[in-house]
Image (cartoon, rainbow, N blue to C red):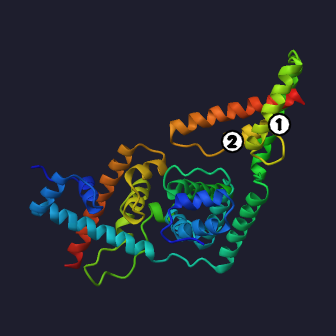
Amino acid sequence: MDEHLDSIALDELRRGEGSAAAREHLDSCEPCRAEADSLAGIVQALRDDDDQGRPVVPPEIDRQVLEVARRRAASIRAHGVIHRHRWLRPAVGMAIAAGALLSMRLSFDALPSPGSRAEKASGVAVTAQQTDLDGDGRVTILDAFALARQPASPSSEIEDERKRSVARIADLAVSVERGA
Amino acid sequence: MTNRDEPDADLVDRANQGDATAFEGLYRRHRDWVVSVAMRLGADRDDALDILQETFAHLFDQFPGFTLTSQLRTYLYPAVKHRWLDIQRRRRTRVRLIRLISPPPPGPPPDSDRVDGGRLLATLTAEQREVALLRFVDDLPLGEIAAALDVPVGTVKSRLHAAIAAMRAAAAVSEKKVR
């Protein structure tokens, strides 16, 4: 490697990353070593500056945050309940409306045969416990909504699986509605 | 109980099962960093403490079912930034990213050849400053910074490159003045 290292390459070496060739160049190149030393000085200065002036978090703030945490943990242990915030209410309303529309549409569908209804009911009973995400004791369109609103994953594989699960839970909610 | 070396992913798993000590572990581990990020963005002490509470309330609200696909700070950074912008919007004031875009008030003249980090940062644009701090102070990998800022890795690299050049120039000027 004959060319001098750019700042990104020097930064990678500072972090113990970078290629062996880059490291070898740095070891033998005086100008690059000077640049690396300069970068190290800049990094240290930024860290020193960041340490100054940061306020100490008062104990009452810690207590308040940890009380929220304690309540959330207790809720998960007891019910697995997902408490919804006020900002979510309009969205929940929309989901309820969507569920109602879906139920209305289904009421026009032909009734399944008695045998198939029984099969569906028994199948649903097993799966319902696994898909009752909001812990209200029922599988409804809101459970699909709860899964859909979770933070998106950068992994397309996980996202695809999530979308399939949302569809499955929605289908299950419809099956429960039909079987009731 | 939480172990200092326990990965965030393990704490998240335990929190998903309702373990209060795991929630506390996540809070204690990232509390000061959240405050620090808020203040870097321009929040004063009171705002930073409000942002701290709101950010963790928001994080806890994601449980159960929270999946950690990258470093937790990659998730927290945009949450802190969003809350700071929200505070500004609520107040209907002009954007005042004081520490990001304005030079700090003049301090006493340097009495040594030590480089002053605040002065270096004052030479950067808001975007350069954000990347430089996430990289050099928070030690985040380039990919994680890109995810936190929702920009391509190439953009992170170009901002970092420009930031280093600007800070080198500022440091060189500062050293000349001292001599």
Expressed as whole percent of the image width and height from the top left, the position of residue A142 reads: 78, 39
Q: Where is residue B123 in the image (x, y as percent from the top left)?
A: 35, 62
Q: Name the residue under label 2.
A: A147
The answer to whether B78 appears left or right of A171 in the picture is: left
* In this rendering, position of residue A66 left or right of residue A119: left
Write the residue at 43% across / 53% down: B127
Q: How far apart are marks 2 and 1 (CA)?
A: 15 Å
Residue at the spot of label 1: A96
* First in sequence: mark 2 vs mark 1: 1
Nearest to viewer (mark 2 / mark 1): 2
- The answer, for residue B35, to whether it is visible in the render is no
In percent of width and height, residue A90 lies at 79, 42
Q: Nearer the viewer, residue A86 or B92?
A: A86
Query: Height in image: A129 above or below B39?
Result: above
Circles 2 and 1 on the same subunit: yes
Amino acid tagged 2: Leu
- Secondary element type, mark 1: helix
Q: Which of A81 and B144 is in front in this view?
A: A81
Residue A26 as seen in the image, left or right of residue A138: left
Amino acid type at circle 1 is: Ile
The residue sitting at 38% across, 71% down in the picture is A47
User: Residue A162 sits in which quadrant?
Assistant: top right
Q: Quadrant of the N terminus of chain B?
A: bottom right
